[in-house]
Image: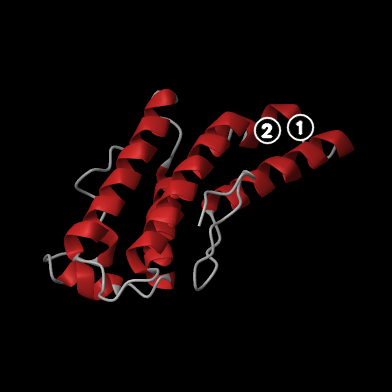
Amino acid sequence: MGIPETPGARTTLPIMVERPTAWWRENVAAEVAELAAGTLDPNEAFAAKLFPTEMLTDTEEVFDRFEADVVGLVDHRWEPATDEEIFDVIERTVKSLNVVNARYDGAAYKTGEREQLCAYIERVLDSAAIDVDAFAGRHGMTRHEITDEWREW
């Protein structure tokens, strides 16, 4: 499976997972429409500043790689992925998101976005039939802690 060419496109997983960037783009588009209609005071517009197109595209590139890596963990394999392989994919993804966040002076992902990113990582793993709770439990953590070791956002 190749990495999709279209921003926001996804590799094929057993269950499609909504990307946080789709919701972020919807917020920007809704705000643009409200500004054009005159129903939003320009001083109250913030979505385009929170979610600049380049940051969204950079984040989606990380998602493309992550989804392809997760497919590689489970696609056409005789045995399940090892915990080390799963951690490698999570680490690479989180560190790539750290790079995106650093490009925006640590402000690309606010608290709400951080929670959405972590939930997205968990859902993609779940969708690939990786038992995230069991995986995390084997390492003395909860599913919500699997990104903590590398996360700088």
The relative height of residue 114 versus residue 132 in the rendered view (above or below) is above
| Badge 2 amino acid | Glu
Q: Position of residue 77 (x, y in %)?
A: 32, 71
Q: Is residue 43 left or right of residue 131?
A: right
Q: Residue at x 37, y 75 (%)?
A: 129
Q: Residue at x 43, y 63 (%)?
A: 124
Q: Position of residue 114 (x, y in %)?
A: 40, 47
Q: Is residue 151 left or right of residue 7?
A: left
Residue designated by label 2: 44
Residue designated by label 1: 41
Q: Is residue 48 left or right of residue 114?
A: right
Q: Residue at x 51, y 35 (%)?
A: 58
CA gap between label 1 and label 2 equals: 5 Å
| Badge 1 amino acid | Asp
Count of number-bearing discs:
2
Q: Quadrant of residue 50?
A: top right
Q: Is residue 34 left or right of residue 54?
A: right
Q: Position of residue 118 (x, y in %)?
A: 37, 55
Outermost residue to the right: 37
Q: Nearer the viewer, residue 73 or 136?
A: 73
For label 1, the crowd category at 10 Å Cα-Cα, with few meaning under 14, some 14 to 19 and many 20 or more, is few
Q: Nearer the viewer, residue 13 or 150?
A: 13
Q: Quadrant of residue 94?
A: top left
Q: Is residue 9 visible?
A: yes
Q: Which mark is residue 19?
A: none
Q: Is residue 106 visible?
A: no
Q: Position of residue 130 (x, y in %)?
A: 32, 72
